[in-house]
Image: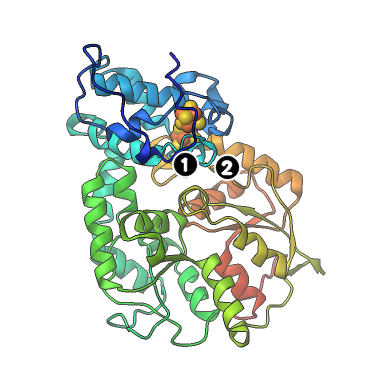
Amino acid sequence: MSAEPSSGAAAPATTTPPPPPTDETPTRRGIFDPALLDACISCGFCLPVCPTYTLTHDERSSPRGRITLMRALETGRLDDDDPTLQEQASFCLGCRACESVCPAGVQYGHLLEQWRDHQWRGRHVPPIALAARAGVRVTPAITAAGRLRRAARQTGAARPDATAHLMLGCAERALFPTISRSVLRLLPPGVVDVPSGQGCCGALHAHNGASHEAETLAEELGRRMPGTILTTAGGCGAHLASVLGRQRVQELSEFLLAYWSEHPDAEPDLGEIRVDGRRARIGLQESCHLRNGMGVSAPARELIARVADYVELPSAGSCCGSAGTYSVLRPQDSRRVLQTHLDEVEAADLDYLVTVNVVCHRQMIGGLRRSRSRTRAIHLAELLAQAAGRSTPDTRD
Ligand code: SF4
Ligand code: SF4
């Protein structure tokens, strides 16, 4: 890969001027925002944190290599059918770990969305990506699944006096309804409401080559829930924040810490989580989009440490391989990424592994089961509800 001229500054991408047009400047196809695409200075700082580069040690599977591929697509040096372009647009997890270490402020997540918007069209759309886009549009079915599985009861129109409106994510409603019920048990009645008629936030669309629809869905949800939206899923939260603005969105761990700090009387009496007569050993699997998209990392650790012995895993902040639809789209690669995490959990001899995003939760439950681990995955909301004595206690035998 050829090195690009360095600006020598860590200025935000939006303030980096594109190079002046010259006779040598290749024609742009308009696939990417030029300011975003030109921001990369090819320093390579992002390579060590990229899970796919760690797996392959192939430059093409790195953030820098992918940006070079995007530039080749943009200028027509590679065409849409190029197999490396197809492969790398799909192989990337979209975890945005590269953004967190980039000195030039490259907004890789936006570049990836623009890439997939273009690359995943017509016959190039992976069937699973199509299914994901279509599946979350079937909101009556998801709502029915949530009712059947008893997600938090919806409370009618959004109340203007509620501190925040709890968002019921599509996957959470259908698969893990106890998460939303646990949230309500941690706060005094009326602090959060659960507006009815919630649709999809559009995060899965954004990650699967349908950015325009993703934005429309987020805006619709924002209109249905004016004010602060509370989410238990980092992926949904980061997408909503990118469309509605960061100030409109609160993730559960940051919300609870702030609310309990301002209203100490509202904090439930959190007991100790105990297993086999001793204080539990508990680790964390972070959500990439919560950490790298919303900048929220510490609050979950602080809350776990209040109720148990917190054990820091070396890869707690690295992608677990779930990555939206990735575990379905590329199951083998997903499991390769996951294996490091499973090995670390076993080495740490954890009782619980806390998750803060629903697809990570599903990924860790599946991985721990397959590896016959004694460690259980539990969402942060469920753990805290258990510590508050407001859920079914752990009765492992
Ligand atoms: S760290 Fe940023 S500027 Fe450096 S190669 Fe990676 S994306 Fe480009
Ligand atoms: S989003 Fe994640 S997998 Fe994709 S290039 Fe960045 S660090 Fe690598």
Q: Position of residue 122 (x, y in %)?
A: 17, 33
Query: Who comes first in sequence, dot 1 or dot 2?
Result: 1
The response on whether ligand 2 sits within 8 Å of label 2 is: no
Q: Which mark is residue 318?
A: 2
Q: Position of residue 183 (x, y in %)?
A: 50, 74
Please tell me which residue is depicted at 42% across the width and 61% down the height of the picture.
175
Which residue in the structure is indicated by mark 1?
Answer: 95
Q: Are marks 1 and 2 in contact (CB under 8 Å)?
A: yes
Classify mark 1: helix, strand or loop: loop
Which of the 4 image quarters holds residue 144?
Answer: bottom left
- 237 displayed left or right of 134: right
Say above or below: 396 vs 183. above
Please tell me which residue is depicted at 36% across the width and 24% down the height of the picture.
87
- 70 displayed left or right of 250: left
* C-alpha span from label 1 to label 2: 8 Å
Name the residue furthest left: 122
Camera-side residue of 192 and 150: 192
The response on whether ligand 2 sits within 8 Å of label 1 is: yes
- At label 1, the amino acid type is Cys
